[in-house]
Amino acid sequence: MNNIFKIAVQGLQTNKIRTFLTMLGVIIGIAAVVIVMSAGKGLEGLLLGQIESFGTDIIETEIKIPVTKKGSSQMSSDIEGGMAMATGVTITTLTLDDMEDIDNLDNIKRSYAGIMGQEQVSYSNELRKAALLGVSSSYIDIDKSEIDYGRFYTEAEEKSLAKVIVLGTEIKDKLFGDNNPIGKNIKIRKRNFKVIGVMKKRGSVGGMNFDDYIYVPIQTTQKKILGINHVLYMIHEVENMDFADQTAEDIKSILRDNHNISHPDKDDFRVVTMEEMLSIMDTVTDTITILLLGLVVVSLIVGGVGVMNTMLVVISERTKEIGLRKAVGAKNQDILNQFLIESVIIAILGAVIGIILGIIIAYLIALIAGSYYNMDWDFVISMDSIIISFIFAFVLGLGFGVYPSKKAAEMHPIEALRKE
C-alpha cells in the first residue's frame, strides 16, 4: 500500500499546474464552507448582541395586523401583516392607556412606549430631514442608551407636553458641528424645541441608527408634532424573568380586554419575551447558514465533477503506464487504489488550502465589519467547519474518483500497451 501511495504522489507531481487547477474547484468550495459557517456565527453573535443591548429582562409589545385567514401559520400571518403595513395600513389601537394598565401588573417594574416619524428640522442656516424617536421619559432608565452630556427629559416634562429634545451624536454634528447645542433651539414644524442633552454614541442596532435620532417626549410627539394618539411599541422591564411567560400572557389578556378582542387570531398586537426574541434570531441565522451551505454544496459538486473529468484525462494520457504496471503483475485493485488515492489526495490538499484561505477571508470580513462599519462582529472558526470540510473533501475525492479509477483498473494490459 505504501508503494501504491508513492506512485500516486509521483503521478500528481508529474503535472503540478494541472493538479493545482484540479484542486481549484475544491479549494473554492471548502473556503466557502469555512466562510459561511464563520459568518453565520458572526451574524448570530451580532444579532444576539443587538437584541441584548435593549436589555435582557424585557418584554416587548408591538402593533400587528390581525390575521384575516383562518388557520394561517405564524409566518404567513407575519408576511401578510408586513405587506399590509408596507402599503400604508396603520394600527392605532395601542395607546399609553394600555401601558398604564400593564404597569399595574406585579411583575412589571416599569415600561416605556415609542413611536417614530420624520420631519424637517432646522437650526440657523442648517436644514435637515431628521428621524424623530418619541419615547417615554423612562426610556433612559430601561434602555442601554446613555447621556453624554446634558440630561434626558423628565416625566413632568413629558406630561406637560414640554418642547424639549435630546440629540443623537450624528444629528448633533450635522446641525451644530463642534458647537455645544445645550440650551439652543431647533425648529420642528415651525416650533422651537430646546436641546437639553446629547446621547452617547451607540451606532446602528437592528437597522436603526440611534445616533441620528432626535429624542422627543412621547406625548409631545403625539400631540404637537404628529397629531396622533397611538404608539408603535412598548418595552416592559420585568421584575423576575422566571415568570416572563406568564407575564406575557397577562399582558395579552389586558390588551384583549382593552381592545375588545374575542379571539387570538384577531390580536392587533404581538407580545414577545426576550427568550422568544433570541429563539427567533437563532432560527433566522441557522436558516440563512443552511441555505448558504446548500449553495456551497452545489459548488463542491461542481468541483468534484472537475476532479472526475481531470482524472479521466490523466488516465487517458497514462494508458501505457497502466498497461506496463499490469504487465509486471499489478492487479486491478492496485490500479483502482492508485487512482482513488490520487483523487482523494487532490481533494484533501484542496481542503487544506481551502480551509486556510477561508480562515483568512473570514478574518478579513470580521476585521472590516468591526473597523469600518463599527459592528460587534466576532471572528469565530469552529471545529465543526474544519471537520465538515475534511469530510466533504474525502467524500468528494472518493465519490468522484471511483468511476475514472474503475475505468483504469478494468483496462486490458495488451490493449493498453498498444495504445499510443
Image: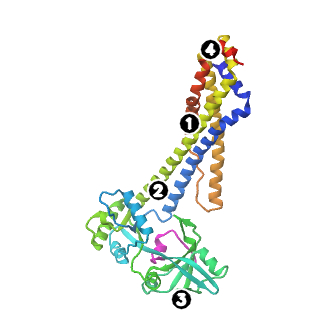
Residue 244 visible at all: yes
- Does residue 105 lie above or below 196 as drawn? above
Q: Which residue is mark 2?
A: 281
Q: Amino acid at mark 2?
A: Met
Can you tell which quarter of the image residue 241 is in? bottom left
Q: Earlier in the sequence, mark 4 or mark 1?
A: 1
Q: Are marks 4 and 2 in contact (CB under 8 Å)?
A: no
Q: Position of residue 358 (x, y in %)?
A: 63, 45
On the image, the x and y values in percent for residue 237 come to 41, 68
Is residue 162 shown above or below 84?
below
Mark identifier at residue 190? 3
Q: Amino acid at mark 1?
A: Phe
Considering only vertical position in the picture, is 113 above or below 406?
A: below
Q: Earlier in the sequence, mark 3 or mark 2?
A: 3
> What is the distance, in whole Å, between disc 2 and disc 1 at their CAs?
28 Å
> Residues under labels 4 and 2: Cα distance?
60 Å
User: Which residue is at a point 39% across and 57% down the rendered structure image?
Assistant: 75
Disc 4 target residue: 412
Residue wearing tag 1: 392
Mark 4 vs mark 3, foreground winner is 4
Query: Which portion, as a residue range, is magenta?
Result: 134-149
Q: CA distance from mark 4 to mark 1?
A: 33 Å
Q: Of callouts 4 and 2, which one flags the residue occurring earlier in the amino acid sequence?
A: 2
Colour theme: rainbow
Helix, strand or loop at mark 1: helix
User: Callout 4: few (<14), some (14-19), or many (20+) C-alpha neighbours within 10 Å?
Assistant: some
* Other residues around mark 2 within 10 Å, as few (<14) / some (14–19) / many (≥20): some
Mark 2 vs mark 1, foreground winner is 1
Quadrant of image for the N terminus: top right
Q: Secondary structure at mark 4?
A: loop
